[in-house]
Amino acid sequence: MAYDKDLAFIYKNYTRLVFGINAVKDVGAEVDLLKCSKAFIVTDKGVAEAGLAEKVEKALGSRYVGTFDGCPQDSGYHIVNQAAEIAREKGADCLISVGGGSVIDTAKGMAILLKEGGKLEDYSGFQLLTRPQTPHIAIPTTAGTGSEVTYAFVIKDWEKNQKLLYADDYIIPNTGILDPTMTQGLPPMLTAITGMDALTHAVEAIHALQAEPISDAMACGAIQMIMENLPRCVENGDDLVARGQQQIAATMAGIAFSNAQVGLVHAMAHCVGALYQVPHGMANSILLPHVMKYNLEYCPDRYALVARAMGLDVRDMSDEEAGEAAIQAIWELTRKMGVPQKLREVNVPEDGLEQAADMALYDGSIVYNPRPVLDPEEVLQVYKEAW
């Protein structure tokens, strides 16, 4: 893959990664490495009821000081503020997030408040922090978001019904513990849509305007691993080898898009998520092939790279044809896993698409899309095709 002769970039990856079956047992040692002694767990009711938070609590031993298990699917300002206050009362000096993207995002917001005080609303923006925040160890229970290695988090303003993006290098988790047993009980559909979230991260990292050789390598590696292992995870949730490979792939995709950025898929997914409560991975999965089709003429060489990473035989194809093959492969993957392929299947109303299209133009992700997006009518057309 050729790059522009004027290519210049900065590549970042700050998180220490600990991988392995039963690696969660090492969480106490990781707390000690951070020179902390009072660990506070952040999780949700489902993870707590599954006994996963209890595993972490036992591994922490005397370092454990408390748990907040009230994280919803789309965490909000009031949730982060409430949880931070509880952690402060417990004297927490580090946070352990145990859950999916919303849980990890909640902990990222809490990390700011425990260090800086105030409310999360006070810190809205990008790269505004001036010092390291409260130490944070992320233990994902899904294999999709890559939040354990990213500098961004999304919080919903429940009053305005809008998702807001925060981004700052100082809130990247210090440590990510990838333990396949922590995703073992994830139901097939959740496994599929969180896996499609990771695939979307990798594909968008390749087509985003800040793509560069290192992020490309991470993204291509993630795509290859996802195509090989995600169907196995869906078919047999107890396949810990496939579960582990999918976790690694999701983390690699997270590292890739943290450097290269994303694009229109995420801008559109954030809006139908905020307006109509479509889970983020589901929205990404449905919208990804449609946005790729919209972008294809602007970056055919990028999608040819995606096709090769998928293992497709594109030797006798043009870049455009290879890109079409990649789009078709995504359709086939979601069909095989039983994931909905249209927005109407997940209760998005047709008469609500125009509002979502208007909102998408103001999402920060759209800036990095390879095809410039300035007209809400173009976004609306993509929504309609996905509906």
Image (spheres, rainbow, N blue to C red):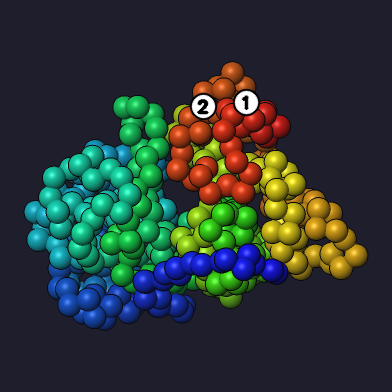
The amino acid at mark 2 is Asp
**Secondary structure beneath label 2:** helix
Q: Which mark, residue 358?
A: 2
**Secondary structure beneath label 1:** helix
Q: Residue at x 30, y 59 (%)?
A: 171
| Alpha-carbon span between mark 2 and mark 1 | 8 Å
Q: Quadrant of residue 283?
A: top right
**x and y percentages locating residue 258 in the rendered image:** 46, 60
Residue for badge 1: 377
Q: Residue at x 18, y 51 (%)?
A: 113
Relative to 44, does residue 223 appear above or below in the rendering? below
The residue closer to the viewer here, 231 or 376, is 376
Relative to 112, does residue 121 appear above or below in the rendering? above
Mark 1 or mark 2, which is nearer the start of the sequence? 2
Residue 380 visible? The answer is no
Q: Is residue 293 left or right of residue 233?
A: right
**x and y percentages locating residue 110 in the rendered image:** 23, 53
Q: Is residue 233 left or right of residue 161?
A: right
Q: Residue at x 26, y 52 (%)?
A: 128
Name, please, the residue furthest toward the front: 6
The residue closer to the viewer here, 303 or 108, is 303
